[in-house]
Image: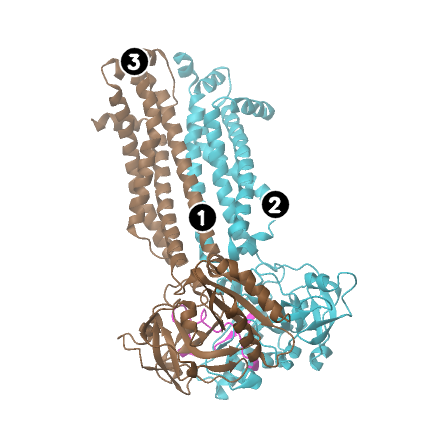
Amino acid sequence: MFGYYLHLALRTLRRNVILTSLIIAAVGVGIGAYMTVTTVLIEMSGNPIPDKSGRLFVPQIDLWGPNTRPKGGTAQVRLPNQFTYRDVTAFMQAHMALRQAAMYPIARDVTPTSGNPYSQEGRATYRDFFEMFEVPFKAGAAWSVQDETDRADVVVLGKTLAARLFPNGPAVGQTVNLEGREYRVTGVLNDWRPSPRFYDVVNGNAFATPEDFYIPFTTAISHQIQTDGNYNCTALPASGWAGRLSGECIWFGFWVELPDAAAVRNYRQYLLNYAAEQRRLGRFHWPPLVQLSDVTQWLDLQHVIPDEVRVNSLLAFGFLAVCLVNAVGLMLARFSARANDFGIRRALGASRSDIFLQCLTETAVVGVLGGLLGLALTELGLAANRASLGYLAAAVSQLTHTDPAVMALTVALAVGATLCSGLYPTWRATRVQPAWQLKAQ
Amino acid sequence: MDIIPILRALGRRKVGALLIALQVALTIALLANSLSVVQQRIAHMQRPSGLDEADLFTLSNQFAGSMADLSARIRSDLAQLRAIPGVVDAVAVNSFPLRGYGGSTGVTRTPDPKAGSLNAAEYAATDRTLATWGLRLIAGRNFRAAEVSEFHAGESYAPPAVAIVSQALAKALFPHGDALGQNIFLTTTAPTRIIGIVARAQTPWAANESAMFGAEYSLLEPMQLVSPGIAYVVRTQPGRSTALLPVAQQQLYALDRVRILSDAQTFPQTRAEQYRSDRSLALILVVVCLLMLVVTACGIVALTTYWVVQRRRYIGMRRALGARRADILQYFHVENLLIGGAGGALGIALALGANAWLAVNLETTRMNATYVLVGTLVVMALSQAAVLWPALRAAALAPAAAIRGHQVEIS
């Protein structure tokens, strides 16, 4: 029977061409606009490390006290989002988590063996960074604990920089010149593109690509490499590098991996104890206030998704609603115009559910066509986004044209929405009295 | 015109009328809110930086190789830039408005940091910076060459004896308007005296500043920055910045190869780059709104056309009984006005409700009531226009032909 309905549905597409194409256009345009905006939102709010996001935490401590907190929002929202050197060194030494890494962004000039120097973004961190964040290696491995202790000049290269520096051979074991100092390559990363770049949403664009190179934290500190990110102080630090390290300036990120609830509790207690101790030592003049946020909470707290994107997505949803209301009206007109057909079928013995199924099949066919149009428009919209979105473009740029999941979702959404909006017109169509129609003839 | 028969006739096609009203309402709510967001974006994009943007270009310079005598390298760079025919002046600074990144400092009126400080962008400026950038001094004086000292990156910082502040910062610190000559504190150690106030100088991150205030809290300190990373801001004769930008790049490289020049942009390019996402979000909204108006209009045309076809007999009868074409036309327009009016009232409520919700939940600004009014008028006018074509077709029906035809509706 379904085959027959499908046949009927395809035949009737040709009747009422204008009405039918208007319905398809309304559904298609609505779905296209909604999916364009939603795809951006989905991509931005995606979990960058789904299997571990609940086990990775950023601690925060009230380092500066209530007087220096910006106005507005709760104390939790306004806690300093980075740490001082003194704090991260204490955390690393305490080693209270399964894995932990202090880090900060750096920039260095790379001098290749031939050609002009160029500037590259990098990160100074601990070796746990790679395992904690499941960073894939293409060759080699992270540097060793010994390298960290020795403050060795070693480097892990991103895939792109490795290919640029050593196009013809393996990079591991070679040396790279970073501002006049030779670093030995211990590993090369494979493609790695967490979006958002969750491990550092404080410095720069949260949707930027990961850095081109990584060196040990201890090495960077001993070479007095300054941060390429935010450097905030409540009081002017003493002069020189020693002053930078001993002052109340925050410029370090810190992440821990805590495998279970007990570990989280323990770590929170450790932070509280640490803050209390700092108070005893006379550094803090306020009660301890600490916070642990997992990946999702942290991205929320740092407001990674701009409000504009959320507003746009709500407006696009409203637009879809307008399109669907429109489609309901049009379908009502379309089925009404065919009341004669239904009357005759009813008179020839078709039951109400037969008519219902027939109408539903027709609606679904229209929905599929609307979905296909929506799909084309989504591609168009995303292309326009990529071309014009500025700092948000990074989030959209990696969306492939042919993500089957998004395509299926688009068509399914179109069919579902069309079926929903077709329910009332369909119900009305089944109410046709056979006798009335025949009499009217 | 008697409205009662129209209302009674509408009662027989409740669902269709309801759908049009709902669509009109939703369209108004979305249009008004979108217009408001677009207007906010445009206002954001149009805020002036305080610079003479048209004739400026900028280069980010990063010296590589030996860092000995950076000061001389910067001086010879500046001399080279100033010698280019068509260049008016050039300065080497730590950052400039709309660059996207730079430094900031807490500023207080007393040496006590607990007194609550304002965060202001810091610009390292010389006696030539004001004229090169085109900042307008509204009170006090410019720096004197003798007041400018070298500041080497990484060395300990001592607050300067004098500074120039933006008007916004001056007002925020001294609301009574007596900022000139007052002392401010950048550290807890020594005071800095305000010797000049400029009308406007945006911060490097003004484009990303969602709060309207604070984007103009800027402070100019008399110092020549000496650092491997430095920005050159070059002012040219009118209309020559685009042509001279590649010349400047080429000459700097010719002078000293061991460097990295990046972000070579005319200032209008910098502005466009910084406000790119604002522009594109506004554009997306405008496109969606236009599409929505088209969809709504098409829906109204289609449903009205359908009603006209349904009511051929009725129209024919009225025509046969002496109704003029204008009466038929009027009938459909008044009917649409009734539906649109109901939708409009609902739309205004929806628009205001949605805006209030957005303001609370997404920190957007409250919308100006004009946008609701404009949105309502636009959608109602569109609705009337959409009815015109089907109504004209109805009016064109010949009385006899209309009665002969028949059409059945699902009631």
Q: Which numbered circle lies on residue B399?
A: 3
Quarter of the figure that contains the C terminus of chain A: top left
- Residue furthest to the front in view is B85
- Mark-to-mark CA distance, 1 and 3: 49 Å
Answer with left or right where residue A435 lies relative to residue B11: right
Residue drawn at 42 percent across, 87 percent down: B189
Letter of the chain that mark 3 sits on in the rendering: B
Residue A41 rendering spot, x and y as whole percentages: 51, 52
Question: Same chain for marks 3 and 2?
Answer: no
Residue drawn at 34 percent across, 79 percent down: B195
Where residue B323 sits, quadrant-wise, is top left
Callout 1 amino acid: Leu
The chain drawn brown is chain what?
A: B
- Mark-to-mark CA distance, 3 and 2: 56 Å
Q: Which residue is mark 2?
A: A401
Residue A415 rendering spot, x and y as whole percentages: 53, 36
Q: Which residue is mark 1?
A: B283
Magenta region, mostly helix, strand or loop? loop
* Residue A76 is inside the magenta segment: yes
Dot 1 or dot 3: first in sequence order is: 1
The residue range painted magenta reads A58-86
